[in-house]
Amino acid sequence: MPAAAASIGKPGDPARATRTVNVDMDDSMRFTPDRIEVKAGETVCLNVRNAGKIRHELVLGTDADLKAHYDMMMKDPGMRHEEANSISLDAGKSGQIVWRFDKAGTVSFGCLEPGHYAAGMKGSVTVM
């Protein structure tokens, strides 16, 4: 998990998830929805589905974390994410991230596959 993970929250217990948010990823380089609102302290299950024909991922982080990780992905395009704050999905696949959003603020998310983040495949979670 990135060093700044503590500032964006921590992995959550699925049994304590207060709600589920469905997030679709597709080849138009968009997340639907691309804006999510949660309460500080809330544990949310993100049901993530790749509705596209190519691999996509959803990575939670700060803007700085995502930019740094994206730069690494450009150098190593085959790198797969296996962290609690991310999910990488082949075409047609689905998965989950369960996350506890601890502090008020903004948590960013993006697809760090080469070219996707730069094409606008990003969004945010507003923690109130």
Image: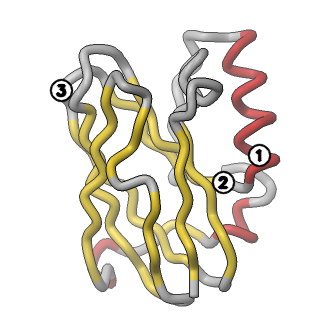
How far from the left and from the top, in percent, is residue 35? 46, 62
Percent position (x, y) of residue 102? 61, 83
**Residue type, numbered disc 1:** Asp
According to the picture, the residue beneath numbered tag 1 turns out to be 65
Q: Is residue 30 left or right of residue 5?
A: left
Residue in the image at 75% along x and 70% along y? 7
In the image as oriented, which residue stretches furthest toward the left? Answer: 92
* Front in this rendered view, residue 31 or 55: 31
Say which amino acid is labelled 3: Gly
Does the CB distance between marks 1 and 2 fall below 8 Å?
yes
- Distance from disc 1 to disc 3, alpha carbons, whole Å, reads 27 Å
Viewed as shown, does residue 64 lie left or right of 76?
right
Residue 92 is marked as 3
Residue visible at 37% across and 20% down? 55
User: Quick one: SS at disc 1?
Assistant: helix
Q: Dot 2, how many residues are within 10 Å of its Cα: few (below 14), some (14-19), or many (20+)?
A: many
Question: Is label 1 in contact with label 3 (beta carbons under 8 Å)?
Answer: no
Of the pair 69 and 104, the residue shown nearer to us: 104
